[in-house]
Image (cartoon, rainbow, N blue to C red):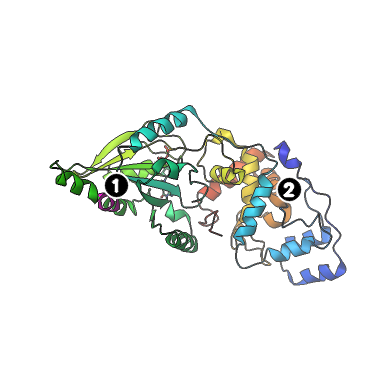
Amino acid sequence: MAALAAHSPPPPPPISPARSRRHGSFSCPSLRAFVSSRSVSPNAIIAGPTVSWYQKDKTSVSDYVIEGLQEETNWARLDADLHYWTKTLRPVQWYPGHIAKTEKELKEQLKLMDVVIEVRDARIPMATSHPQMDSWLGNRKKILVLNREDMISTADRNAWANYFARQGIKAVFSNGQLGMGAMKLGRLAKSMAIGVNVKRRAKGLLPRPVRAGIVGYPNVGKSSLINRLLKRRMCPAAPRPGVTRELKWVRFGKDLELLDSPGIIPMRISDQAAAIKLAICDDIGERSYDVVDVAAILVQTLTRHPEVGRFLSDCSGKLFNRYNIDADIFGGRMFLEKLALQLFNGDVSQAAFRVLTDFRKGKFGWTALERPT
Ligand SMILES: Nc1nc2c(ncn2[C@@H]2O[C@H](COP(=O)(O)OP(=O)(O)OP(=O)(O)O)[C@@H](O)[C@H]2O)c(=O)[nH]1
């Protein structure tokens, strides 16, 4: 938390009369009030390299507000800003003992697998991509699953489907809660490993079930997918990371065996923007991050999403509608402070937790936090 204060920018430059006039058309009273007061919280995480209105004379608050009215999220720019915002925060690292043990066991079990099903969180397909996964898998056949498809928009889904298709990877979208995509996954795993029993027969051996290992980051929905496929609760699943602690083979019919594995994550997460996204999506242990830092960054990220946090001239952004606080104006940290005063007797941690929970429940609409750029 203290690290965020280091972001404190000098006060914004005065708004020239010409610039003030540009705001004449805004009907939102808060925006008008803001523009006339020309003050922004010194604690706010307000600027990335591309929003440095307090650094450059030429850019002003007014430019920032007007830029916020763009029709679409500028994902490349958002990504750059996310890296900037996370630079001075306490690093997020999470590597509990059971993950180290799993990594070791998983490498052993890989030798037995005919096909590997890698599950990622559809909201953050890149942040939930393990940097060592491909080297562990070698030539082993892989199916990529983007789970939690219900938590992203159709545009997000299309963007990721096209992105992976361009790389020759067919991504399967699934919903581990309702089971959509689970049967398809079972069929795909069997069909991809069909050659196993062809070879066995050629050698005079009896056919055996195809073995598919399900791997991925914590809390992305691996156990849920298996349970949906089996139509039974065979594997422990719960809304927090690190529930599965042991590797476990389960049988699906007579010709498929599935390995449920605990979520794995690199020992050191070098990309801290990715680490914050894991925290926002609850894919990393709660104790590894500062909830206020993470929620403040979430608020600022959402201000870049049209319809969610954007400060429209009629104040119709979903963040504003839910809390009646102007995220675009106050920046993430001050937004939380205001929410804390409004609802939680000044307890900023509780306010931060509320914003994170609301995001995870889709209260601002369903949206991915990453798009291919
Ligand atoms: N909305 C939604 N929730 C899902 C989906 N898939 C799983 N969940 C929920 O996400 C939570 C985590 O699911 P798990 O199956 O335990 O995830 P896991 O990858 O096995 O987690 P670890 O044990 O940490 O490895 C559970 O509360 C599920 O109900 C999905 O597609 N959509």
Could you tell me which secondary element the residue under label 1 belongs to? helix
Residue 323 visible to an observer of this rendering: no
Of pointers 2 and 1, the one earlier in the residue sequence = 2
In the rendered view, does 199 fall on the left or right side of 344? left
Report how many numbered discs are placed on residues in the image. Answer: 2
Residue 222 visible to an observer of this rendering: yes
Q: Nearer the viewer, residue 344 or 207?
A: 207
**Which of the 4 image quadrants contains residue 371?**
bottom right
Q: What amino acid is labelled 1 in the image?
A: Leu
- Residue 325 vertical position relative to residue 73 in the rendered view, above or below: above
- Which residue is denoted by mark 2 in the rendering? 44
Q: Nearer the viewer, residue 28 or 22?
A: 22
Q: Which mark is residue 62?
A: none
What residue is drawn where x is 36% and y is 41%? 223
Residue 273 position, x and y percent, is 61, 46
In the rendered view, does 135 fall on the left or right side of 71? left
Mark 2 vs mark 1: in front: 1
Q: CA distance from mark 2 to mark 1?
A: 46 Å
Magenta highlight range: 188-193
Residue 32 position, x and y percent, is 77, 63
Residue 301 position, x and y percent, is 62, 53
In the rendered view, does 86 fall on the left or right side of 359? right
What residue is drawn where x is 51% and y is 48%? 360
- Residue 98 vertical position relative to residue 126 in the rendered view, above or below: above
- Which residue is denoted by mark 1 in the rendering? 229
Residue 191 position, x and y percent, is 26, 53
